Image (tube, rainbow, N blue to C red):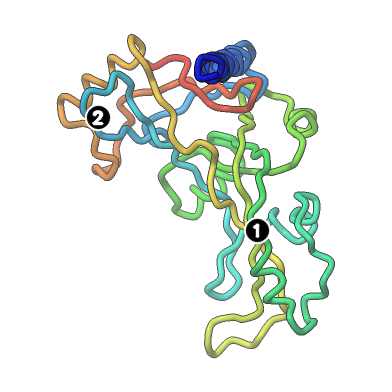
Amino acid sequence: MKRILLWTAAGLVLLANGWAVLAHWRNRNEALGGKLELTERELHLLAEAPESTVTALRLEWATEQKEDGEERFIPWLDAAKLLELGFDCRMPLDQPGARRHYDALPAKPAFLVLEAGGRAWRKTAAKGGHGSRLFVVDAGLQAPQLRQRYPDRQQFLICRGVVQVRYVDHRPPGVAVSPPQLRGWIRMLEPELVFAAPPQNRPLVQLLRTGGGDAHREPGEPRFAATLCSGANYEPWVEGIR
């Protein structure tokens, strides 16, 4: 009996490992999610972990923002978009208990569209914004539909993320109260870290050895660029570094 259990456990481990390898191969077989060249502004080089052979890069991204008093929000992530993403937005916003209802809604997974150096970034840069050129510009539940809307794989990257709803029923003190509104915010990209493996990470390793891993250093010309791909599973990976 013990031998049967051991063989069963070993078979499950092999099956799980085989499935992981197959998923990894399928994801990298075709960059359905797109391919962007990003720089150090969008890929912050993290300190090297002891005995690690890979180099970690954190994705730095932004969203176009508008202001309502002191409240900042993403203009395209409105009630209609939240409904499209599967949030239960049927309760009237002025109904008692509306805040409790919307505050209790869990975050939802979604596919996100990212653009580097596009219209959203140019508008933000014109207002004095700086930093990452990578902006989330749309979201949806079906990646193929988003790809039809944004067909250029060299300009728009599709990956996974998490979206949260916000119920807003106030403004700063001294400002007239506005009608309640539903607004959304992007909680995270999945994953937020990507990894470069040998031998392509050699330029990054050299930067780390010369003290170049500080993500909060003074801004300047980026020291490296990397090609970021999003595969058939819409999971990003680093294809090349220069």
Residue at 78%, 81% in the rendered image: 94
Q: Is 142 displayed left or right of 224 in the figure?
A: right
Q: Which mark is residue 106?
A: 1
Q: Which mark is residue 123?
A: none
Q: Rounded to the nearest whole Å, what is the CA distance between mark 2 and mark 1?
A: 35 Å
Question: Would you place residue 96 above or below residue 201 in this image?
Answer: below
Q: Quadrant of residue 112?
A: top right
Q: Quadrant of the C terminus?
A: top left
Q: Looking at this view, is 151 or 91 the one in front?
A: 91
**Circle 2 SS class:** loop
Amino acid type, callout 1: Pro
Residue at 55%, 21% in the rendered image: 229
Q: Quadrant of residue 142?
A: top right
In the image, which is nearer the foreground, mark 2 or mark 1? 1
Dot 2: within a 10 Å radius of its alpha carbon, few (fewer than 14), some, or many (20 or more) residues?
Answer: some
Count of numbered circles on the image: 2
Residue at 69%, 81% in the rendered image: 178
Q: Which residue is mark 2?
A: 48
